[in-house]
Image (tube, helix red, strand yellow):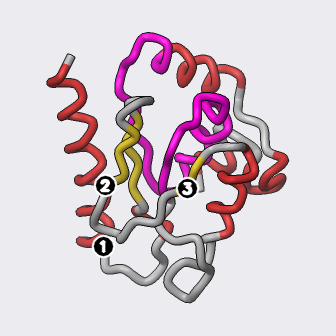
Amino acid sequence: FGAAKNLSDFATKGPEMSVDPEVSQVITSFHEAKKPIGMCCIAPVLVARVLAHHGVEVTVGSDQESEAYPYAGAAGAIASFGAKHVVKPLGEAHVDVANRVATSTAYMCNTAPIHEIGESVEAMVEEVAKMVAEK
């Protein structure tokens, strides 16, 4: 929950969150320069908050709270910002081609073995690498 506690106040404010100004500036600068952005676990809420007015699409996995996804309420927060949450299985990344953002679930899935978490992160990194290679 580093992104939710240290890079923003999402952990305490939920949908009323704000993003650290320096982090917001980096996200904005990357977006303006059309550089790929990759985020996993809870970090996609940062991009969703900062780039919502660009119609950004992200995933934190599920939008239904369960034993596997106890923090799926983050999907509702993402939607409340005006961004779009896309439900994805753990092993897949979501790519918002228009905004050059790749996101994946990672530790938002509470029941997955560590190798599956790693595969989730790897999927996001691979999508970012593809975007880097395109430019």
Q: Which residue is mark 1?
A: 114
Which of the 4 quarters of the picture holds residue 121?
bottom left
Between marks 2 and 3, how big is the CA–CA gap?
18 Å
Kindly check if marks 1 and 3 are in contact, taking CB atoms under 8 A apart as contact: no
Q: Amino acid at mark 3?
A: His
Between marks 1 and 2, how big is the CA–CA gap?
11 Å
Q: Amino acid at mark 2?
A: Val
Residue 62 screen position, x and y as percent: 51, 71
**Residue drawn at (20%, 44%), measured in percent from left and top?**
126
Q: Amino acid at mark 1?
A: Ile
Report the span colored magenta.
30-59
Any mark on residue 85, and which? 3
- 101 on left or right of 7: left
What is the quadrant of the C terminus in the image?
A: top left
**Residue drawn at (17%, 23%), measured in percent from left and top?**
134
Question: Quick one: 17 or 55, which is closer to the camera?
Answer: 55
Residue 132 screen position, x and y as percent: 22, 25
Sooner in the amino-acid sequence: mark 1 or mark 2: 1
Sooner in the amino-acid sequence: mark 1 or mark 3: 3
**Residue drawn at (67%, 38%), measured in percent from left and top?**
49
Q: Which residue is mark 2?
A: 121
Q: Within the magenta stretch, is there residue 34?
A: yes
